[in-house]
Structures are given as C-alpha cells and as structure tokens.
Image (cartoon, coloured by chain):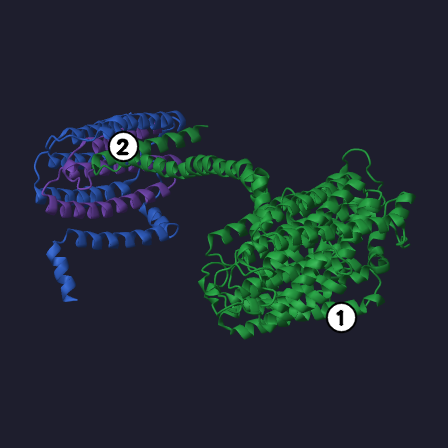
Amino acid sequence: MTPNLHLWLIPVLPLIGAAVNGLFGRRFTRQTVAAIALGFSGAAFAMASWVAVRFPSLTTPYQESLAQWIRAGNFRADFAFYLDQLSLVMLLVVTGVGFLIHIYSVGYMAEEGGFYRFFSYLNLFMFFMLTLVLANNYLLMFIGWEGVGLASYLLIGFWFTRDSAASAGKKAFIVNRIGDFGFLIALFLLIKHFGSLNFAQVFPTIASMSPETQGVGLLTSIALLLTLGACGKSAQIPLYVWLPDAMEGPTPVSALIHAATMVTAGVYMIARSHVIFDRAPGALTAVAIIGTLTALFAATIGIAQTDIKKVLAYSTISQLGYMFLGCGVAAYSAGIFHLMTHAFFKGLLFLAAGSVIHAVGGEQDMRKMGGLRTKIPWTFWTMTAATLAIAGIPPFAGFFSKDEVLWQAYSSPHGSWIYWLVGVITAFITSFYMFRLWFLTFFGEYRGANAEENGQAEHARHGHGGIHESPRVMVVPLVILAVLSVIGGWVGYHNNFENFLAPVFRTGVAVSAEAAQAVGSTQPHPEAGSTESLLMGISIAAALAGFLLAWLLYHRRPELPKRIALALNGLYVAVLNKYYVDELYAILFVKPLIDGSSRLLWRGIDQHVIDATVDNGAEGARRVSDTVRHMQSGNIRSYAGWVAAGAAAIIVYMVWIGVR
Amino acid sequence: MVPLSYYLVLSAILFTCGVAGFLIKRNIISIFLSIELMLNGVNLSFVAFAAQWKAFSGQVFVFFVMVVAAAEAAVGLAIIIAVFRTRETLNVDRVNLLKL
Amino acid sequence: MIHLILFSIFGIVCVAGAVNLLVQRHPINSALSLVVVMGSLAAEYMLLGAEFVAAIQVIVYAGAVMVLFIFVIMLLNAGEEEQTRGSRVAQLFGIPGMLIGSALVAWVLVAHSGTQAVPAGALPGPPKTIGWLLFHDYLLPFEITSVLVLIAIMGAVVLASPAQAIQQSKKER
C-alpha cells in the first residue's frame, strides 16, 4: 500500500509564498519578505528531501492525485503528480539549487527596488517549475512549461523601466512561444491518436508499438514537435537567441532560470518522453545533431564575448547542447547526469559572476576587470572550482558527466564518432573560453575604473568604496555549490547514477536485443574498457589544452589576442557579433511580421474594415434619419395627409385579409 | 324596401367627404367639422347593421361613439381656443412652430 | 316604395350637406351644413327603426355638440379662410388614398353584405332594450365613458382658460 506523500505540497508551498509576497509584500519589511520567500522555498526543499528519504520504500512510479481537472468525454487530465527516479533527481536539483539561489538573492538584491516583487516572482517560478517536473500528464506539464516561460519573462524584464530589459523579456517569451507551438501540436497529436495525455496511459501504449525506421511516421512527428518545444525552452538552434539577451535580468535570475532549471526543462521533457523517442530514430538523430551543432556554435561565439554574463550565457547554450546530444543518442541518464552537474557548476558560475560584478560595483566587461584574485578570495576559489568543473577536469563534477555524454555519443547504437569528435572539440573550446574568463577576471592587473566612477549596470549607487568581498549571505551558497561541483560527479562512479535512473528508462529501452545490451540496462559496462579509457584521456587532454591556450593568450602573452583578432579580422568580427543571427532573424521574420501586421492587420482590417463598419453604420443611420425627419415637418396638413394615407393602407390590408 | 347596401354606400360617401374635408380645409374648425362628419358616417353604418342583424348592440355603440365625439369636440375646441390666443389665426398652415 | 323614396330624399340632403361643408369657405357655413347633415341622418335612423338613436342624435349631436362648435366659431370670429399653401403630401397621398380606400370599402360593403332589404322600423322593442343593454352588458364601457366625459370637461376648462388664470390659481395654492 502506497503511503500518501502529499506531493502537492512541494509546488504549492512556493505558490503560497509567491501569493503572500505578491499581494502584501509591498507593506512588509525586507526581512519579512525574505523570510517568507526563504521559508516557503526552504520548506519545499525540506519536503523534497523528506520524499527522497522515503523514496526507497516506494513503488515507482508513484502517482498521487490532488483534484479532478478535465473530464471531456474519454479524455481525462487531472491535477495529479508522478514521482519516479527521474522526477526525484529533478526535484532535488530544482528545490536545492533554487533554495540556495533564494538565499543568495537576499544579499544580491538587498539594495534594489521591488524587492518583494522579485521574491514573489522567484517563488512563482519555483511553483511552475515544480509543477512541470512533478506532473503526471503532459497537460499539467505544459502548464508548468508555460508558467516558467511567464516567470522568465517577468524576471528578465524585472527592471522594466530599462528598454533593453523589457525587450529582452519580450524576446524570450515570444521565442519560447514558437517552441510551445511545436509542443502543443505534439500534444494534439497525442490526444488524437492515443486519447490521453497521462504518462501512465500513453507510454505503455506507445511501448507496444515498433520503432519507425522508415520515413516520418506518427511517433517521429510527435517526437520532432516535442523537440521543437524543447529547442525553444532549452535554447538550442534555431531558438536560442533569447538566452543571451536574457542576461538583462538580475544575476540570480540568470543562475536559477537560465542555467540550472528552466532551460533544463526541455531536456527533462525529452527524457520523460524517451518512450516516444526510442521508437523514432529519426527524431533522435535530429536531437543529437541539433545538440552537437549548438554546442559547437555557441562555444565559438563564447570565445569572443567580453561581457562576463554573455560568456556564461553562450556557455549555457553550449552545455545544453551536450545534454541534447546525450538524449539524442538515447543515453538519457547521461543527459540528466550532465543536467545535474551543470546545475551545480553553472549556477555557481553565475552566482560567482554576480559576486564579481557586485564587487567591482556593477561593471560587467571583463576587459575592465583583472587581478581580483586577492581581493575577493572566496569568490575566486569557488569560481575556480566551477571553472574546473565545466572544463571537465577530473575529479570535478563536470568531468564525469561530460565524459559520460561523450562516451555514449561514441558508443551508443544511435551515436557516431562524429558526435564524439565535435563534442571533444567543443570541450576544448569550452575549457579555453572558461579559463579565458578566469584569467581575465582574476589575474593580471586591475584594469577597471574606480568602483565609484561606474555609472552603469546593476547597482551604481552602491559605492562603498573599493573592491570588496560579498556579504556572507551571498558567499555561503557559493561555497555549498562549490562543494557540490566537486563531489557532485562522484555519483556517476561505477554507473551508480545510471543504475539509479535505469528503471525509468528501462520501459523505453529499444526492442532489439543488441540495442538493449549496448544501451546498457543494468549491467555496468566495463570501465576498464580500453576504448573508453582512451577517449577519456583524449577529453582530459582537450580540457588541459584549452587551459594551456588560455594561459598562454591571457596570462603569459596578453598582447597576442589582439593581434590574432586583427589577423582573423572578418571571422573575428562575425563571431563577436554572434554571426549576425539576430540581425538575420530580424530581416527574415521580425520585420516582415511587423510590417505585414501593421499594413494588413492594423490599417487594412482594423481601420478599414472594423472601424469603417462601425463608422459607416453610424453614418448610415444618420443619413437615414436625415431623410426620414422630413416627415416631421411641423406642417399640420402633411400630418393629416400621412394619417389618411396610413389609415387607407390599413383599411386596404384588412379588407384584403377579410376578402381572402 | 331599401337594401342594406344603399345605407352603406351613403355611409361611405359621408365618410369620404369627411376625409376629403380633413385633407383640404385650411381652417382648423372646418377640419374638426370634417371629423364630425366622418363619425356620423360611421354611426350610420352601425345602425344599418344593427337593423339588419336585429342586434341592439349596434345602437348602443352609436351611443358610445356620440359620447366620445362630444368629449373630443369639447377638448379639441378648447385646444383651438388656446392656440388662437397665441397665434391669432385659425389657419392650420400658420400653426407650424415646429417647421424645419 | 315609400321607404325608398324617403331614403333617397334624406340621402340626397345628407350628401348635399356634406358636399356643401367641403365647398364653403367660412366655417360657420360649414357648421350649419353639418347640422343639416345630422338632421337628415336622424331621419335615416328613424327609417331604420332606431328612434332612440335618432332622438339622441338630434338632442346631443346636433343640439349640443354642433351648438358648441357654433359658439366657438362665433367667439373666435376668424373669418374666411385664407389661401395658403397646403401640404403636398396631403394632395399626393391623402386624397387619392382616401378615394381608393373609400371606393374599396364601398365595393366590399356592396358586394358582400347582401342586398337584403332592411324594412322600415325594423327593430322591435322599445328603448327599454337599449337601456337594458347599456346597464347590463355594456356597463363597464358606460362607466368609463362617464369618466371620459369628466376628463374632457376638466381638460376643456384647463385648456381654454386664459393663461393668467391658471397661474393665479397656482399661486393661490
């Protein structure tokens, strides 16, 4: 008998916090607002931990229904929750990292206006993300999906008085919408062909279908449309353009939403739908290709960026590409593993970057930083841990997960050495630009203006003199995340993580026997296998090579980068301007849409049809009344005439009726 | 013996004359007289039918018509007097304050 | 035979009076013509056997209503009609409409009401029957008409009284 875990509390607690802060927060003191926000998100984390403790005693998947929602004929969708190993991992990541970022934000946003609004939005985001993760049917997941998009819009445009922030929020929401369109069509297809959106009903039905190896059938279509949705949410090609702009939001927002949780929703969704993807090899290939390309593409852009947050944004896109690659070769647990470690180190990177920005009084341009190593030691050491993790250097977390992805990319039956090669090149570039960031920020001479002279960016009025370490409330989460970045990967040892997630992905394991063996159900594949060790060595070498190159260009011979940039002039400018993708989209899509809308919809339909109808209706009534009013002439004899005429008409009519 | 239709034709002629006067005349009182003429024509019709169907209700109705005509004449003439006081004319075409 | 002759005589007098009403310019002449019409109508009623109605016609209609008309004409003393421009609507619609309507009515009446002869003095029974009907079957209309007359009296008094008199009575309140 399954105990009632009251899973619904986990999303609802932050919702209550959001409501309380949103409705009454304006009147509270900052401490009260912070206490409410931290209290509710902490409670959600505590509940998630409690669920984790009780997890081994549950039969999975554990489902719990809160309330009836939709009953339309045979179609049912309820407010019901679904817990299995995958959800548990996501749950812990979201609540844990989320809670840490809440704590950090108390310090980071301490001097900002709209304090209560920020925390209300943060809690709201937690609610939606948790709904997304815990939903037991696609429709409830979609609600969470949309909701995190909304929270993202609200938080990106938090400083809405700034034009760039407001535009960035709009851009994020609209680009997400395009992905959501794909998601919705996939849902419609599911409803039409399977009559339900509940995981427990759809997946077993699909599991009995055979894989579509020829052409694009139903499952491939659904999978491709789901991929489109995931591309929007997880910022893959072609819908990644919103993520760099999203850096307009406060740094904790970038850490939580655009590194650790929201952008991973797409990966989670693909992993959750693995039953469909396993039977649609074409879609899997598409996912892998998109992931690989995006990883490489974004990494190359990251090389040339000068804003510290933009580098991290492109890094996020690139790492999401890795997760997509993992899922695309049907190594879902590898993808989720990387998701988890990425949440740790990328969240830490963003928070530490926020700490750096805070320290230098709002400057975000790395060219104006430098030599901060001694001045903000805690930030330095935690950021170092994160940089080592993302570069994939053992024994840090990123190494294990990235290596797992690369190995699966090579060895999975859906994988190929091309994926692996591009992945390794990207790892090299990742290591390079991350260490570039590290060197530019913390080493060398301090190149920035005095803190008080900075007029721009996040808190200019902050000027307590000089470069200072962040307050404890900001440093403690950094430390915790740094510890996780170090040890977080060790759960992957001996494939523990993969075995843990295996029951989730087992039901979707491909039908053919050799595929079952190769993707690896419960048998651990030999780690001492020579190919695997070789590949592991190559990826470590790539990471170290990146470090060396960065050390050379940005520490040893800092005049070199400028000369290289001049030498590769055209290429450098293209990369610096993000390959002009935004401009391309503007010409291809945005401008025609706006022009067409204003010409056709506004002038053509709104003004000339709708307004004209109303105006002409009124004009017509006026003209008719103008004509008819001559009947009221004030001339009594004309009245007499009309009366007589009317009476005659009536008499004729009645006689006619009578005669008939 | 007079056929019923003769009475009805006579009634129609009276009514027609009344309507004609109503439309042609310019003096308000003359118009009123035409209205009375119309009422009389109708009365004749009632009585004729009462005689044919041997029903007294027709005559009772004539009674009522007369009462109404009397009341209407009283009020109408009072109005005419009031109008005459202000406009100093009984010409209907002159009483056109509402004219466009 | 006699019936027909008498009917024709009084009928011609009626029509002559009606036409004269139309033709005359001075309203007093028209009023007097109307009196003639009413008188001959009373004779027609007699021929139909409705003596009570004939008496009422003479007493009330010709004797009271028409007298009222003549009082007012003489009081206002407006004189002959002027020739002013009338209404085109009346000429265009009213007269043809009226002509057509009445012709139609006449045709229908003639065609459908049968050529049954109505004998002279056809109605049996004394005025008592009328009284019976009036106070039994038509009691409600009777009472309402009495109220109507009351209203008419009040309205006539108010409408016709000079404006200062009304205001004075209001001030006295």
- Do pointers 2 and 1 mark residues of a single chain? no
Give me the residue at 36% from left, 28% from top.
C109
Residue C81 appears in which quarter of the rendering? top left
Q: Is residue A586 visible?
A: yes
Chain coloured green in this rendering: A
Give amino acid for label 2. Answer: Phe
Label 2: which residue?
Answer: B15
Q: Position of residue C163 (x, y in %)?
A: 12, 54
Please give left or right for residue A533 compared with residue A110 in the image. right
Q: Position of residue A69 (x, y in %)?
A: 68, 57
Q: Secondary structure at mark 1?
A: helix
Q: Looking at the rendered structure, which numbered label has been put on residue A314?
A: none
Residues at marks 2 and 1, CA–CA distance in whole angstroms? 103 Å
Give me the residue at 77% from left, 50% from top.
A539
Chain coloured purple in this rendering: B
Q: Position of residue C66 (x, y in %)?
A: 17, 42
Q: Position of residue A203 (x, y in %)?
A: 80, 49
Q: Colour of chain C?
A: blue
